[in-house]
Image: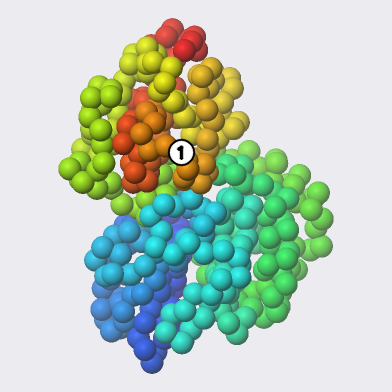
Amino acid sequence: MLFRQLFDPESSTYTYLIADSVTRQAALIDPVLDQVERDAQLLRELDLTLVHTLETHAHADHITGSGLLRQRLGSRSVVSDAAGAVCADVKVHHGDKVHVGGITLEVRATPGHTSGCVSYVTEDHQNVFTGDALLIRGCGRTDFQQGDSATLYDSVQQQVFSLPDDTRIWPGHDYRGRTMSTVGEEKAHNPRLGGGRSKDQFVTIMSNLNLALPSKIDVAVPANLACGLAPQSDSALPIERGWAPVERLSDGTPEVDVAWVRDAHAEVRLIDVREKDELTGELPMLPRADSVVLAELSERMKDAPREEPIVVICRSGRRSAGAARTLEAMGFKRVASMRGGMQAYMEAEGGTCAG
């Protein structure tokens, strides 16, 4: 197996290139949009054909390069079905196999950091690509994107620590210059998940982290649900005009202003895509809005009528913009994002949440 570990310094993200040296077929695990040119050049230099891009989850700290690589090189994007990415060419489940020439990767569901996390294990059990589920002497946070500490503990213990001790662990990130670890090392030395720590101890550790949200979460998550691509051109979208005073931004986002949402007829469905813990306090959910967290949007809306008028809402308008584009890609004809989100709504209403 031909193997390269690549690094994006801005997000401290590792991308992995694996290839069959005989067939010259290759896959990239967790490609980064800003590094597409680097990755494409390496593929050319090594005379490789990119057949798959594999995502370990819907990232919150960078935008994936899978969509652009698909456009340029014809690769197929592989994403967990639980991640909710409507753009994926192949939606995988626990136990599925992904083939790259003569190389076989086993998909292992490892939710907990997000609900849609997977790890990829080589057939010989010598390598596991864990994304953010298990890092070197650490793990991914569990306080957003349907994260759950108890679930992550079970995922790592059952799906990663069950591998042989000499299995090499290739993480999604590292912030201290470390490149790889082994199952045996992490079982012994990981301060959160190793050393015989119990599930209750792990849950307590994670609940006391008190981390700030990733700076790119409002942009990265909706973009990654669309494989990192901007929406289609306006003319290609199945949009019904005239249902609302929609303005389309340069990136393709359909928007309506706060005043129109406030006065909108009851038939317009309002969907708030924020995390559950964001729906109270200074920016509460509108009384007649439905809560559909962003990571569950595709699954929750797959059977909804495509003619239904929908306005998507979030805190600032960034996540709802991506959600609106996602719904358009799913075929919804009357959809828009509320410009400025609940911040703009509360400012316009003088701090009250009517409507």
Quarter of the view holding residue 49: bottom left
Tell me the SS state at disc 1. Answer: loop
Check the image and report above or below for 329 versus 178: above
Local crowd size for mark 1, using a 10 Å CA cut-off: few (<14), some (14–19), many (≥20):
few
- Residue 186 left/right relative to 198: left
Question: Could you tell me residue 166's position as x and y percent?
Answer: 67, 80
Question: Could you tell me residue 64's position as x and y percent?
Answer: 38, 56
The amino acid at mark 1 is Ala
Coloring basis for residues = rainbow
Q: Residue at x 51, y 46 (%)?
A: 299
Foreground residue, 336 or 27? 336
Question: Could you tell me residue 212's position as x and y percent?
Answer: 54, 38
Q: Which residue is mark 1?
A: 304
Check the image and report above or below for 132 versus 321: below
Check the image and report above or below for 157 versus 87: below
Q: Residue at x 70, y 79 (%)?
A: 164
Q: Residue at x 64, y 52 (%)?
A: 112
Q: Residue at x 51, y 53 (%)?
A: 83
